[in-house]
Structure formats: structure tokens, C-alpha cells
Image (spheres, helix red, strand yellow):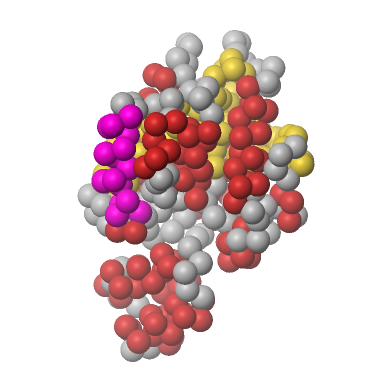
């Protein structure tokens, strides 16, 4: 299979539609087969674009500099009891600032757990709730995870992530200052938390669907947004939302990465853009350090 087939813009648009529930697996394969003139090539493309979580190990779970665990927390207005992945520096000499990590539309997979560990290595407490907790948790593969997440009520999931912020604020190792970062669905949810919570310390959104322009005035937290230049679907709503942010005098920073597509931070798929991922993450850590006033 040639790379030009794998990264054909038509194929990538179909894949984006597939992973976001706009078309079925069968529709992706049949449409891609028409482009490539081969059902075999279409199946190979889908396999190549699907995540390889063996790659999601920038920080080992056994890294001695951090401590990791799974924790439950109460979400009385959401699902009741939720579960998430927690990581902090192994040695805590003072209270730490915290970041809620919000996964894509498929549950708490190994890539997101690795992002939590990256935050811990940077000196934060990271915590990633699994929105699939009420359904048994992330099932071990993204296809089933996407199907399961579509079964959850979106407003209830908002309450689950709001409760996660409160859980961290009350954690004995937390300074009380909490930010959020999310990817795709999680990027949209990170911005939703900024709309909902006036005391959120900072919010970072990677290629997430933007809130309604009318919601911009409710945002108090500083925002950082990361967009891939090739991500036409998400980027289409950015000009209107940026105008609303400007009108509401919201503090924000927006970065667009040339030749990067939706999902460019996820290092387990071919859409990963190493340069954009590294630069955006450096900016995100600096943003949290600045706005959450990380000590030490």
C-alpha cells in the first residue's frame, strides 16, 4: 500500500467521519475501496490508521520518578461513581497543581494514560476520568469504546468531568488549582469546563469542537487551543468562536500547525505529527506552569 493512498485527503476525511460516528465501518471500507480500486487496500488502510498502543509509552508506568494508581470519585449529578487514572511525582514536597485529562470519544485508553504520566513527570498531578465507567470502563479497543461512549448522555458526562475537577481540588496533595486538557471530544469538554467553572485555573483544547459563541462570555479561565491546519471540520467553526472570545475579552492563545491533521498529538496512529505534538505539548506545559503558578 502506497503512502499516497493512506494519506489521500479523501481517505482521511472518510476516516475522520468513521471515528466520529458519521459513517459506519462498512461505509468507510466501501468508500475507500472505490478510491483505491481495491477492497484489500481499503482494509489495509483501516488497519494502518487504527491505533497501535504499543507506541503509547513515552513514560513507562514503572517510571520510578512518578506514582500511579486508579482512583474512584463521586459524581452525584452524573454517573454516581466514576473511576480514573491518577499520576503524581513520587516525592511530594509541597502541594501540587493539578490537571484533569479528558480522553477522546472512546474512553480511557493507553495513550491518554501516558499523557497523564507525562504531566506527572512535568511536576503536576494528572487525573484522567474514564467516561465509560458506568458501562464497565474502556473495553480494550477503540471501536467498542466509541460505540459505548455514544450510549452515554453528554450532559451527564459533563457532570462527571465537573466532579473530577472538584475531586482534585479537595485532594490532600493538590494546591486547589486545577486545569484541564483534552483531545477531540476531550478538547471540546475542556472548553466546556471553562464555560461551566469560573474557578478553573486554565484550559487547553486539542482540536475540539468549539462551544457556541454565546458561551464565550462565561469563560473566566485562560484558554490555549491547538488546531491542525488540515482539520477542516473542526477549524470551520474557529473564526466565529475567536470573534466571540475577542468580544468577551477572554484570554486565549491559538496555535495552528501546518500540515498537521486532526489527532496530530496521538502518537499511536499515522496522523501523529511528531514536530507539532512536541511543540504543542511544550506550549501546554508552559501554559499550565504560568497560569497555575507551579512552584519549584
The reply, left or right, for residue 270 in relation to residue 152 is left
The reply, left or right, for residue 287 in relation to residue 70 is left
The residue at the far left in this view is 258
Q: Residue at horizontal 47%, vertical 55%? A: 268
Residue 247 x %, y % = 28, 32
Residue 177 x %, y % = 54, 19
Q: Residue at horizontal 67%, vertical 52%? A: 132
Is residue 243 within the magenta segment?
A: yes
Pick whichever, 76 or 176, lies toward us: 76
Pick whichever, 289 or 131, lies toward us: 131
Asked if one can make out residue 141 in the rendered structure from this viewpoint, the answer is no
Asked if one can make out residue 184 in the rendered structure from this viewpoint, the answer is yes
Numbered disc total = 0
The residue at the far front in this view is 214
Quarter of the image with the N terminus in it: bottom left
Pick whichever, 244 or 121, lies toward us: 244
Q: Is residue 39 above or below residue 171?
A: below
Q: Main secondary structure of the magenta part?
A: helix
Q: Residue at horizontal 26%, vertical 46%? A: 239
Pick whichever, 68 or 198, lies toward us: 198
Which image quadrant is residue 252 in? top left
Residue 94 x %, y % = 59, 10
Is residue 167 within the magenta segment?
A: no
Q: Is residue 93 above or below residue 262?
A: above
Residue 83 x %, y % = 71, 41
Residue numbers of the magenta segment: 234-248
Amino acid at each position: 500500500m502506497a503512502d499516497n493512498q493512506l494519506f489521500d485527503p479523501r481517505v482521511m476525511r472518510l476516516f475522520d467521519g468513521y471515528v466520529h460516528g458519521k459513517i459506519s465501518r462498512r461505509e468507510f471500507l466501501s468508500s475507500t475501496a472505490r478510491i483505491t480500486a481495491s477492497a484489500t487496500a481499503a482494509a489495509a488502510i483501516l488497519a494502518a490508521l487504527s491505533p497501535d498502543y504499543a507506541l503509547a509509552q513515552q513514560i513507562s508506568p514503572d517510571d520510578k520518578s512518578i506514582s500511579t494508581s486508579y482512583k474512584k470519585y463521586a459524581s452525584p449529578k452524573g454517573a454516581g461513581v466514576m473511576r480514573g487514572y491518577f499520576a503524581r511525582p513520587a516525592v511530594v514536597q509541597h502541594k501540587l497543581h493539578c490537571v484533569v485529562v479528558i480522553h477522546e470519544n472512546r474512553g480511557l485508553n493507553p495513550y491518554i494514560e501516558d499523557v497523564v504520566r507525562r504531566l506527572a513527570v512535568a511536576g503536576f498531578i494528572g487525573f484522567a476520568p474514564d467516561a465509560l465507567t458506568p458501562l464497565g470502563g474502556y473495553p480494550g479497543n477503540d471501536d467498542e469504546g466509541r460505540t459505548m461512549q455514544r450510549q452515554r448522555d453528554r450532559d451527564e458526562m459533563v457532570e462527571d468531568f465537573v466532579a473530577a475537577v472538584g475531586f482534585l481540588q479537595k485532594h490532600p496533595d493538590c494546591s486547589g488549582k486545577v486545569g484541564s486538557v483534552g483531545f477531540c471530544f476531550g478538547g471540546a469538554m475542556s472548553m466546556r469546563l471553562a464555560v461551566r467553572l469560573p474557578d478553573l485555573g486554565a484550559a487547553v483544547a486539542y482540536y475540539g469542537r468549539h462551544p457556541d459563541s454565546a458561551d464565550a462570555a462565561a469563560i473566566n479561565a485562560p484558554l490555549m487551543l491547538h488546531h491542525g491546519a488540515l482539520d477542516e471540520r473542526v477549524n470551520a467553526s474557529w473564526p466565529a468562536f475567536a470573534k466571540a472570545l475577542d468580544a468577551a475579552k477572554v484570554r486565549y492563545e491559538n496555535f495552528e500547525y501546518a500540515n498537521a491533521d486532526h489527532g496530530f498529538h496521538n502518537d499511536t496512529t499515522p496522523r501523529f505529527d511528531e514536530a507539532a505534538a512536541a511543540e504543542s505539548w511544550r506550549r501546554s506545559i508552559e501554559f499550565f506552569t504560568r497560569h497555575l503558578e507551579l512552584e519549584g
